[in-house]
Image (tube, rainbow, N blue to C red):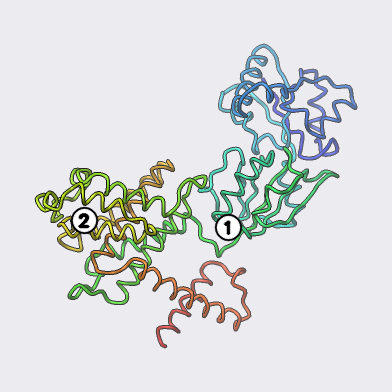
Amino acid sequence: MINIIGLGATDKFGLTLEAINAMKNGNENFLRTKEHRAVEYFYDENIEFKSFDYLYEKENSFEDVYSEIVDFLIEESKNKDINYFVPGNPLIAERTVVKLIESSIEYNIIMGMSFIEPVLRAVKRDPSEGFKLLDGDYFNKYDIDTHSDIIVTQIYNKRTASDLKLDISEIYGDEYMIYLITDAGLDSEDLYYIPIYELDRVENINHQSAVYIPKNNEILNFRDLLIEVEKLSEKITDINHLNIKENNLDIESLENLSKMLILSILAINLSEEEGLYNFYEIIEKSCEIIAENGDFIKNTMEKRKDLRYNCDSLQKEGKVSLIRKLKSYNENALLRASNVIDDVSSIGFIWDEVDGALEKVSEELEEVYEAIKKDISYEISNELGDLIFSSVNLCRYLGFNPEDVLDLTIDKFIRRFEIMSELASKKNMKLEYLDLKDQDDLYNEAKHILEKD
């Protein structure tokens, strides 16, 4: 059997009596690392131990280190009981313990104080209104919940700090204030309250560093965005909702069309991976797919029976010259997409009815949902690009410039938010302290005020 024992998060004075008794029970003691202040107790009491620190120099990755530790411990425990000591609480952010439990060996866990308590004491925040713990080793920006306080542990060095900075700045913004805590609970504890962009500029970062991100209900979550897209999808996929008369849209329909484009762009911004993808690159990639091979369009469009696809006119126009023209566009991505769509539409590659374009948008939304369920970033990126491109296509079919549509709604949103802020001030409210429902009520009130004007 393996006794898995927590050393606590601080020094030898943070050890539990149960942990101390385990050290002296006669079993062989193994430490994941001796780089922990509580290990002083082993030296003070002349308690023998072996550590696995040498593996961190030998192996290529942390995962390899953890796997070798687990294999060794399992082999050692086959004929005798052993003790295995880990920093903090064995059940919090400790991969070797997870692997040991998954191996189905016989084990006993002796708890220790986790690093969470000293971190909370350092930042003086109460996590009871929403809290999330994330592991910096396996960090995924899609796990971020802006409506909860977040601790990101395992910020070992400036490289991991830099990676985290790039990810969270995309969601919160470069200027958002966060805490960096090093050696929480020790006499060497350092606390920094800094904007995100300074995270990797702090010199004092080590294996006991963590980042604390305060919650902000005004910042959109990725899951919030999906809910809004789903609600909007239910509206715009109903052909009767778009009040089309002589190819003109009413104000409400135009607003829904512009919302769809804005939400699509927000989805791209929230799903960029490592800074490799952005909205413009994805739109450009969609344009290139159309430009490079007309046969691709003809053979892969799922609903080509609903298209007025005229192969003869394409040949007459001259496939090579048309593709050369499509490739020549180098404006911003939205305008480039519009020009490409207009050119292929001019030769008959266009929906016969608006419901075909609407169905395509709905279809792309479903494919975005499916890609997100798979949690494969490049598939999500590709499907979001298709969603935006089909949205631009819908705008062009209805005779609207996508940039004008977006500008209209952005201006309107800013005006509504301005009035919303004024209403909050009159009612002695602070927007940042209101929950989403109260904020939404103020926003709707501002909307009604503008409708009366």
Extreme residue in the right direction = 44
Question: Would you place residue 42 above or below residue 259 in this image?
Answer: above
Extreme residue in the bottom direction = 453
- Residue 273 or residue 283, whichever sits in front: 283
User: Of callouts 2 and 1, which one flags the residue occurring earlier in the amino acid sequence?
Assistant: 1
Q: Which residue is drawn at the image coordinates 41% and 87% (left, top)?
A: 452
**Crowding near pointer 1: few (<14 within 10 Å), some, many (20+)?**
some
Residue 213 placement (x, y as % from top left): 64, 54
Locate the C terminus by quadrant. Answer: bottom left
Q: Quadrant of residue 36?
A: top right
Side of 400 where 14 appears, left or right: right
**Crowding near pointer 2: few (<14 within 10 Å), some, many (20+)?**
some
Extreme residue in the top direction = 79
Residue 18 placement (x, y as % from top left): 79, 32
Number of the label disc, if any, that sits on residue 172: 1
Residue 319 placement (x, y as % from top left): 18, 48
Q: Quadrant of residue 173?
A: bottom right
Side of 300 where 101 appears, left or right: right
- Residue 107 or residue 70, whichever sits in front: 70
| In front: label 2 or label 1 | 2
Distance CA(mark 2)–CA(mark 1): 39 Å
For badge 1, the amino acid type reads Tyr
For badge 2, the amino acid type reads Val
Read off the residue under disc 2: 344
Question: Would you place residue 379 above or below residue 413 in this image?
Answer: above
Number of the label disc, if any, that sits on residue 202: none
Q: Which residue is drawn at the image coordinates 31% and 77% (left, top)?
A: 251
Question: Would you place residue 197 above or below residue 262 in this image?
Answer: above
